[in-house]
C-alpha cells in the first residue's frame, strides 16, 4: 500500500470534530433517534461525495462505499479507487473535492441534525396519537 504522509490524516481530521459532536449528542438522546440521524447523515455525505467526484470514466464516482459499524451508531465511508489520492491532491480543478465536501458537512451538520431530530420527534408524536 502506498504511503501518502499525513494526507489521509488531514481528511480524517476534518471529520474528527463532527464525530466528537455526534458521539456527545448520541449519548444525550434516544438511541433509536441517534441511529436514524447518524444513518441519514452518513447516506447524505456519501451522496455528496459521489456527486462531487470528478468523472472521466465513472470509476472514482462508482467506488464510494458505506459500511455500518458499531451497531448502526457509526459508518465508514470509503473509496478503494487506486488513484483517489492523486485526484484529491493533484493539480486538476477537482483537487480537494473530498476535503471540500467534508468541510461543507462540518458546517451544515448542526442544521441537518436538528432537522432530523425534529422529524423523528414529529414521527413519534404522530405514532403516539
Image (cartoon, rainbow, N blue to C red):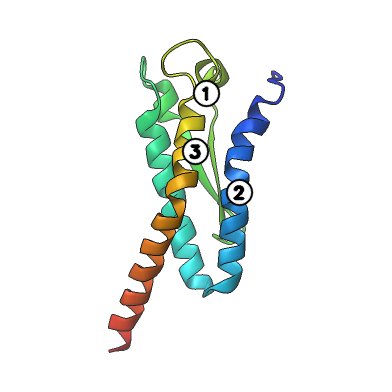
Residue 51 higher or lower than 58, as above or below: below
Q: Residue 3: where, in percent of width, then height?
A: 71, 20
Residue topped by disc 3: 102
- Mark 1–mark 2 distance (CA, rounded to whole Å): 26 Å
**Circle 3 crowding by C-alpha within 10 Å: few under 14, some 14–19, many from 20:** many
Extreme-top residue of the structure: 91
Splitting the image into 4 quarters, where does residue 113 fall?
Answer: bottom left
- Mark 1–mark 3 distance (CA, rounded to whole Å): 18 Å
Residue topped by disc 1: 81
Q: Quadrant of the C terminus?
A: bottom left
- Looking at marks 1 and 2 on the same chain, the residue that comes earlier in the sequence is marked by 2
- Looking at marks 1 and 3 on the same chain, the residue that comes earlier in the sequence is marked by 1
- Looking at marks 3 and 2 on the same chain, the residue that comes earlier in the sequence is marked by 2
Residue 25 higher or lower than 111, as above or below: below
In this rendering, the label closer to the viewer, 1 or 3: 3
Extreme-bottom residue of the structure: 129
In this rendering, the label closer to the viewer, 1 or 2: 2
Q: Residue 85: where, in percent of width, then height?
A: 57, 20
Is disc 2 placed on a helix, strand or loop?
helix
Q: Quadrant of the N terminus?
A: top right
Is disc 1 placed on a helix, strand or loop?
loop
Q: Residue 99: where, in percent of width, then height?
A: 51, 31
Q: Residue at x 36, y 19 (%)?
A: 55
Residue topped by disc 2: 17
Residues at discs 3 and 2 in contact (Cβ within 8 Å): no
Is disc 3 placed on a helix, strand or loop?
helix
Q: Residue at x 63, y 31 (%)?
A: 10
Amino acid at each position: 500500500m502506498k504511503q501518502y504522509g499525513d494526507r489521509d490524516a488531514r481528511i480524517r481530521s476534518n471529520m474528527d470534530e463532527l464525530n466528537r459532536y455526534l458521539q456527545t449528542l448520541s449519548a444525550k438522546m434516544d438511541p433509536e433517534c441517534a441511529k436514524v440521524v447518524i444513518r441519514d447523515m452518513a447516506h447524505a455525505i456519501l451522496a455528496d461525495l459521489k456527486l462531487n467526484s470528478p468523472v472521466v470514466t465513472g470509476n472514482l464516482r462508482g467506488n464510494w462505499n458505506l459500511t455500518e459499524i458499531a451497531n448502526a451508531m457509526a459508518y465508514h465511508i470509503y473509496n478503494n479507487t487506486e488513484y483517489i489520492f492523486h485526484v484529491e491532491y493533484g493539480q486538476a480543478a477537482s483537487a480537494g473535492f473530498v476535503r471540500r465536501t467534508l468541510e461543507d458537512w462540518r458546517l451544515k451538520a448542526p442544521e441537518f441534525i436538528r432537522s432530523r431530530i425534529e422529524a423523528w420527534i414529529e414521527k413519534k408524536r404522530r405514532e403516539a396519537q
